Amino acid sequence: MDTYIALTLGPITRVISLAQTTRGMWAASYIFSFLAKNIIEPFKESKFLLPYIDETLFKEKFDGAGVFPDRYIFEASDKDFDALVTKVDKVIGGLAANIAPSKEADSVKTMLMHYLKIYFFKTTRKKIQEGSGVIREETDSELVKRSEMQLALMEQQDSFIPSVPQNKHYLSKLINCEKLAPMQFLLDDAGIGKFRSIVNITSGNDGYGKEIQPETPYQRYIAIVYADGDSMGKAFAKVKNSNELSRQLLQFNKAAIESIKDFDGQPVYIGGDDLFFFAPVYKPGKGSIFTLLDELDKNFHGALGKDSPATLSFGVSITYYKYPMSEAVRLSQELLSKAKGYGADNPLKNNVLFSLQKHSGQTRSALIHKGCTDTVKKMNEEIIDKYIAVGNKDDLLLVSSVMHNLREHEPILLNAISDDKLLKNYFTNNYNEPAHDSFKGFFNSVRDFLHTSYLEYKDRIDRLKKSLDSPVEGRLSGFEAAYAAIDLCYATLQFIHLVNQKK
Amino acid sequence: MSRYKVTLKPLDWFFFGGDQTFDNGDTQSFIARSNRFPQQTTLLGMVRYQLLKKKNLLLSGDKEADAAKKPDIDALIGKESFDIESAGVQSFGKIKSISPVFIQYGERRLIPMPLTYGLNIGFCDEDAWMSGKRLSKVINAAFEEKKYSNYCKLIDDKMKSWDYEGDEGIFSSSMQIGITKADDGDENDKGFFKQETLRFKSSDTSFAFYLELDDDAILKDDVVFIGAQRSCFKMEVRTSDEKPFIPDHPAGSILLLSPTYVANRQSLDENCLQHWSGTISFCNIRQSDSGNLRSGVVCYHRHRSLCTFLTTGTVIFFDNNQIEELEKLLNKQNLYNIGYNHFSVKK
């Protein structure tokens, strides 16, 4: 057979924006995994170019995480196209029957058929003429790339959302239902009885049960994380077997679910190179959310191998637990988009872009270039791990004082940061009271972190400038590296301050 | 009949609402983001009000005097506000037509960028299925999904592109946070809101539209209040014979030059190859004279209907045998007269 079917499902972002709770967010995301699983199940014996499909995905449960992604490319027989049309019709009909009263199921099915963007097409392997005149067949990676572009084009046809009054919008009602019964079919499919509430997640509590109250200030904050692979096209082109990368990604998915659960986080969607999960900002005994991200990064590189050009970028929003859920998720998605370097002002990938928004509305964000390995190491090991969850009030005041001085003295630091001696002088002159004596270790750590991150960021930016065809203007000139280093240090200290607060 | 160009220069931050509101209606939300453009019905309402104001026909609260004004009001601006479900063409008195709104930036006119602009669009013969519709051809183009951003762009009459926001953008935005109180002053658990307001980055920027009025209707420069929280604009009215500009779009396509209402989505799908589209929800709140008087005061019905429009910049591809039905579907005079359902056909 040389015929393939390429399939895409959506609109995931639009449906997720309907959700107002963690459970709703999970349901909105899981619905697409549920639909995908049921739609492709009859074709699971076919050869899949994207993603890797095996029996375990259909039989195993993954702690509530959806594992079926939104795009599929598989080898197809002549009859498969019509079979897929029939199957999609049946699955959508089944969904309508699950979410709407029986007398309205037909009209809801019609609404869902237009609302959901389930698109697919049939294609054959193309012939390509090389520059030398030789004609060859498309490789798997070329076919996947072409098909993905075609699916992306088809997705531009927006679903013409029927004008449905809120009380008839059964999809929205499912996602935001107060009782579990309406979404029981999703919970059963995921193999979970319930979905943890936000405070259960931030407190590291398992189960649903009675609503608990946060005991510490940091339990009032939740980390919402989106992650996505960078340079996956290059990684795909590099492997010999089209299934090999997908198999590696499945291995990564399983490891990621374990890491997230171990941190008392809650995976929502873990598929391919995409992750979406909730997590506490700190877990005693394990570390901070940044520790978890580091572990996920290791899982990724462990599964794909150190020769793979692929990397993983993260968007992390840390928000107060009463902040509107859909906004926090949207923020996380935007942060991921910027972390991946979409747009001219940050074309380097392999980043964590995080934002810390306090209940007061005060927001601080910073970028961690994961390629700057010393910076990452010092941030996690020399700053966060050493000074998080410290015991006394003086330590807390000190962190706060240094943090605010970073802002107030920014003009000085912008000029001093490039010279370790000048930085030393800054700390010596500003923290020379007897009360500061016992904190020399902390000042040294902060100074070292500032200087190291500046050097690594500057090197990265200089390399970028050389690699770009046109001159770089605006944000990538001048003090960009210094600003980025100071922003990162400030945000890190603010994060520690948040976790260390007693009340 | 006289033709004018009406410009609306914001005097402060502004907010244009959509179907999401802060009230206790069906679509209550904590966060509301301003639309980039005012709705055409908003402009119609503003023109109607201004005409009444100039003729001293605004209702004063005096029952007898207001009742006496009604025939003149009806003749000047029509009997009722815009009704999207109207079967016929409504009359708005002396107001004959309103064009789709655009942005006037210095000497340039800006409209939302066509969604296919800059792409070499073709079709390839491949069996496809899209939301219940079977196709034998699909759109084909060299398309980089990650770099595509026509949704976030405007185009001017010199075919230069502009960003909505960002360093080179036309708009800047600000988030306002507040707590609404319940009517009796008690705490309102759902009172928290965030509202995004907008302003133009350059003071040389305004909204604009073309307006056709009967010769005896008077509209003069004024300060007007439109949008939520009565955003304030300086209105200037000048005669004009300027024609709207039409950006390039592929052969065999229709480019929507304004938000466009299609009553029957299935009909659209059956009568086009594909459409590269955006959608926007629209809530038509209309007020009509109930024909009743209560204590001598004219009573009004207030109706609310939720619709979905295709956005400006949508491109609809067709085969030649489909164009007639397609034009019939899109050509709605009642909508066209107030600036909806304007489109360009390229065969």
Image: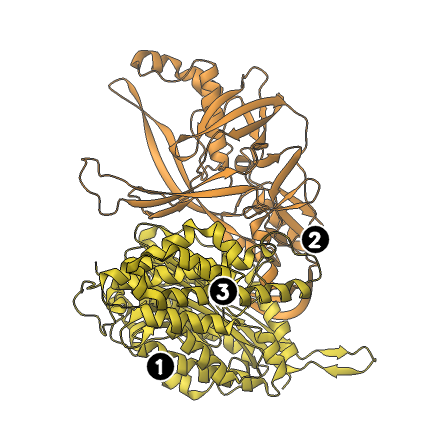
**Res A469 quadrant in image:** bottom right
Q: Give the amino acid type for the residue marked by disc 1 in the picture.
A: Glu
In three-dimensional space, the C-alpha distance between marks 3 and 2, rounded to whole angstroms, equals 54 Å
Chain letter, orange in picture: B
> Where residue B167 appears, x then y in whole percent?
57, 47
Kindly report which numbered mark, 3 or 2, lies closer to the viewer in this rendering.
3
Q: Which residue is mark 1?
A: A258
Q: Name the residue rendered at 33%, 31% in the picture.
A: B301
N-terminal of the pair, mark 3 or mark 1, is 1
Q: Name the residue rendered at 41%, 87% in the picture.
A: A56
Q: Is residue A101 visible?
A: no
In three-dimensional space, the C-alpha distance between marks 2 and 1, rounded to whole angstroms, equals 51 Å
Chain designation of label 2: B
Q: Nearer the viewer, residue A389 or A207?
A: A389
Q: Which residue is mark 2?
A: B250
Q: Which residue is mark 3?
A: A451
Q: Give the amino acid type for the residue marked by disc 3 in the picture.
A: His
